[in-house]
Amino acid sequence: MTVDRETRAPARRLPRAERREQILGAATRAFARAGYASTGLDDVAAEAGITHVIVYRHFASKSDLYRAVLDRACLRLADTVGTGEYGDDAIATLLRAAAADPDGFRLLFRHATREPEFADVIDQIRTGATQIADRHLTGEIPTGPWRDWATSLIPTLVLEAVMAWLDAGQPDPDQAAQRISGAINAITAAAKPF
C-alpha cells in the first residue's frame, strides 16, 4: 500500500529517538496485519505517515527493522512478565502484557514463528518458558518422558490460549487467567503417574 506523496501531510521533525519509536510502533502494526513477507517498508512508512527514506535513516533493511520490532516486543513482555519464575499471578500478568501490546504479542507468537530468519527470538522465549515449566513441575511429576511432555505442552497451551483470548476480543481477563490455569492443572494431572 503506497500513499500518494501529494495527499500526505509533511512529516514533522521529531527527535531521533522519538522518530525511531514512532517507526517501531508503525512497523509493529503493519507487520502484525500481514506478516514479514507481505509487508514492505513502504507499508511501514505509510503507517507512520512518513517516507520510506526516513525509515531507511533509522533502519538499514526490512530485516533490521523487523528484528528491532521483535526485540522491542520481547523487552516489553519481559518488563511486564519477568523472565524467572512462575508465580500465582503469572497467567494474569501474561494476559495484561498481551492486552497492552497485542500487535507485538501476535508478532512474536504468530508471525515470527513462521519466519526461519527470526526463529532464534522465539526459540529463546520457548526455551525459557519450558525451563520455567520444568522447575514448576519439579516435585509434582517425576523426571521422565511425562514430565518432558508436560513441560513442553504447558508453554504451548498458554501462548495459544492467550492468542485465542486476544482474537476473541479479550473477554474477562480474570476469568481467562483462571481458565488457562485450569488447563495447566489438567495437563499436570494428566502427566502424573497413575
Image (cartoon, grey):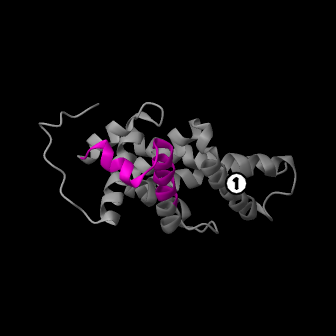
Segment tinted magenta in the rendering: 50-74
Would you name the residue on which mark 1 appears?
127
Q: Amino acid at mark 1?
A: Thr
Residue 174 placement (x, y as % from top left): 43, 58
Does residue 31 show up?
Answer: yes
Q: Does residue 151 belong to the magenta stretch? A: no
Is disc 1 placed on a helix, strand or loop?
helix
Position of 29 relative to 78 (above/below): above
Residue 100 placement (x, y as % from top left): 38, 58
Q: Main secondary structure of the magenta part?
A: helix
Q: Nearer the viewer, residue 160 or 67?
A: 67
Q: Residues within 10 Å of mark 1 (few under 14, many from 20)?
A: few
Q: Residue at x 57, y 55 (%)?
A: 181
Does residue 183 show up?
Answer: no
Q: Residue at x 64, y 68 (%)?
A: 85
Q: Does residue 66 belong to the magenta stretch? A: yes
Residue 187 placement (x, y as % from top left): 69, 48
